[in-house]
Image (cartoon, rainbow, N blue to C red):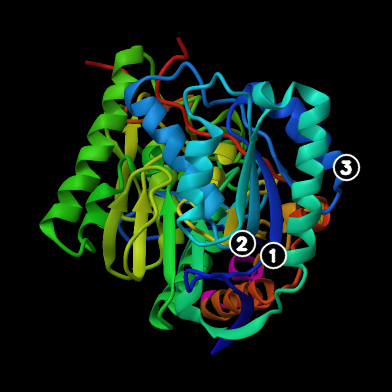
Amino acid sequence: MKNAIIVDEKDNVATALDDLEPGDVVRAGFGDKAVEIRMKGEVKYGHKFALSRLAKGEHVIKYGETIGQMDADVDRGEHVHVHNMLGLRATGEP
Amino acid sequence: MEVSGYPRPDGSVGFRNHVAVLSSVGCANDITLRLGRMHPNVLTLTQREGCAQLGEDKEQTTRTLVGLGRNPNLAAVLVVGLGCESITSDYLANEIARSGKPVEHLIALEEGGLKPSLAKGTRILDRMIREASRIQRVPCGLEHLTLGIKCGLTDTTSGLSANPATGLAADRLIDAGGRVIFGETPEVIGAEHILARRAASPEVKDKLFRLIAQCEERVRATGTDIRGANPSPGNIAGGISSIEEKSLGAIKKGGSRTLQGVLAYGQIPNGQGLFFMDGPGRTPEALTGLCACGAQVLIFPTGKGSPGGAPLAPVIKVTGNPRTAEFLADHIDLDVSGIIKGGASLEESGERIFQELLAVASGKATKAEALGLGGISIWTIGSPM
């Protein structure tokens, strides 16, 4: 089975440890625990995917901390990256 | 725990024994380069600043050049100036010479141009090389070692493996009495609250927050999002989606010990323990700044891998990405991909990095050193006039 890693139990995204294809069932591990997720999108090694449905405006949590905000809705198992999430810091906004 | 190094007159220890020829100004680079070609074992340190700079920008370049010259890895330094620049070669030579090491300078416009400068320079370097060759390595404690840490070409493996393993090695060095400096101010944005919890005093905490605020203000002044510059296109290709995500992984390279102080770019710290240096994340400027702060050995955790070295210190490249370890084997010193793949714990990997640090300090050549990579690039904060 292909693998992914969850860094902190508060996280709502996991990081792929294999190249993932739609339909793949992935084991996303956090320490000794793991969840199985069916992928909805292509996610390359090192990229992130949603562990649950994330709505536009929702904070993206990794390392147990906010790393940004969704700019679109995504389903569980979909790629989360610069095309659908924004950083909240140093954005150039006044 | 002991390493071995070259004792210097001021009580510091070099872990390399270079004689260097250093340009005080970009216009002297041709002379510096030719002197370097005449003496292939001399470290040739060209740089493009040193003139028509104002205020804090000039101060920062001066501080950096003096710090580089004072770095204990340099046994002796010849400073080459033109004679019309604002950061003069005699000023730099005097400031560097406060460390007690042999320092000389020459002024091309006073010597009569290129050829007489080469004639004088080569006589000086001949003497410096022969004198430096007589200095022997002696055993010394880790309190003499300043480690600089900078991560580069980060991907999402960095924050999960190479950075935290490097952080464990940093903790080990600090516990053994050494000093660790890390930096990259933009790569603390979004993680400053975590680093600030470890500040030794409210002053240190305030200074850290002030640097982050200034950095964000510089981004705001451009009216553009930092994303695309930092995280860079390479970081984004590696899966990093925001500066916050990059920062939360990046600060792990500094380990977990108390943050004793916040330094200006290229500022030599007082005291032992962990320090943070202000400066950009861009590799050549970051490595140059750490060397100017006195780092004699550098660790460079990387995700997608990065060739390149530092101006006057060995760089140990560490990756937790198995593809990078294989694909860029010419540049990677340590593969810690077992942390994510399984097969090696974070603790074991941190210990391997620490042991490599001791070996490199005592003379083992890193891959960047074997390839002769590295050069000075100073962080400028103003426009030349």
Instruction: Point out the stretch of residues depicted in magenta.
Output: B338-346
Q: Secondary structure at mark 3?
A: helix
**Labels 1 and 3 in the same subunit:** yes
Q: Which mark is residue B17?
A: 1
Q: Position of residue A69 (x, y in %)?
A: 31, 32
Q: Nearer the viewer, residue B267 or B346?
A: B267
Residue B136 percent location from the top left of the image: 71, 78
Using the numbered discs, state the Cα–Cα distance from disc 1 to disc 2 in whole angstroms: 6 Å
Q: Chain of mark 3?
A: B
Q: What residue type is disc 1 on?
A: Asn
Q: Is residue B106 left or right of residue B280?
A: right
Chain bearing tag 2 is B
- Whether residue B242 appears in this view of the structure is no
User: Which chain is disc 1 placed on?
Assistant: B
Comes first in the chain, label 1 or label 2:
1
Quadrant location of the N terminus of chain A in the rendered image: bottom right
Q: Which residue is mark 2?
A: B73
Question: What amino acid is at disc 3?
Answer: Met
The quadrant in which residue B275 appears is bottom left
Q: Are marks 1 and 2 in contact (CB under 8 Å)?
A: yes
Is residue B21 one of those drawn in magenta? Answer: no
Q: Is residue B353 left or right of residue B366?
A: left
The residue that appears at 30% across and 15% down in the rendered structure is B221
- As displayed, is residue B116 above or below residue B371? above
User: What residue did someone put label 3 on?
Assistant: B38
Residue A35 picture location, percent across and down: 46, 62
The amino acid at mark 2 is: Asn
Residue B360 is tagged as none
